[in-house]
Image: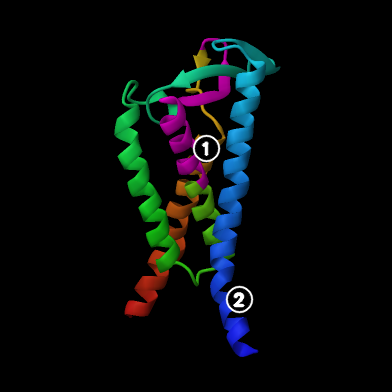
Amino acid sequence: MEAGSDREASLRPVLVLAGTALVLYAADQVTKALVVANVALGDRHDVIGDLAQLWHVRNDGAAFSILPGATWLFVPVTLVAIGMVVYFHRTLVGRGPWVQVVLGAILAGALGNLTDRLRLGYVIDFVSLGFGDTRFPTFNVADSAVVLGIGALVAYLTFVEQPRAAETAR
């Protein structure tokens, strides 16, 4: 019975990471498909006045349209990022499920935009926030997952892991 419990305990972090990644990846791909099917390329539709808009654009650069035209540069960069998620998963596996949720979000975002780049040669972006002509760069669910996931991971490493390591070193 204990062997089964040990196996369950060792699989739980993998299932949390994979489950999070699957849900967010699906959300990314479904929202992109809905935008492509319902919003003409270049069209904008107000969602909350002009504060939040659906704006169907093609992004051949990085997140938030950084480095336009460099689509194929980001394929190997994304593969390295996926490798880093695997590394952090292995090194932080015993730190609680929310760490795996954060890593799953990063993985989902990386895979969501990688899918677009490999399939289309560009990424579909559609969320536009701002006022009038002053707008944040257009983004998608995958971009949000990566940015929020990295932010949460950095906060965790800075405010939890670093103090823990310093305490252990004493």
Would residue 109 be counted in the magenta stretch?
yes
In the image, residue 101 sits, relative to residue 62, either above or below, namely below
Q: Which residues are magenta?
A: 108-133
Horizontal and vertical percent for residue 70?
A: 31, 26
| Residue 8 relative to residue 88: left or right | right
Secondary structure at numbered mark 1:
helix
User: Would residue 53 be visible to someone looking at this image?
Assistant: no
Name the N-terminal-most of marks 2 and 1: 2
Q: How many residues crowd mark 1 within 10 Å: few (<14), some (14–19), many (20+)?
A: many
Which amino acid, by three-letter code, is at mark 1?
A: Ala
State the residue position of label 1.
142
Question: Label 2: which residue?
Answer: 8
Q: Nearer the viewer, residue 102 or 154?
A: 102
The mark tally for this picture is 2
Image quadrant holding the N terminus, namely bottom right
Residue 131 horizontal/vertical position (percent): 58, 15
Q: Quadrant of the C terminus?
A: bottom left
Identified at 54% across, 10% down, the residue is 42
Task: List x then y, in percent, for residue 69.
Answer: 33, 21
Q: Nearer the viewer, residue 170 or 86?
A: 86
**Whether residue 137 can be seen here:** yes
Q: Secondary structure at mark 2?
A: helix
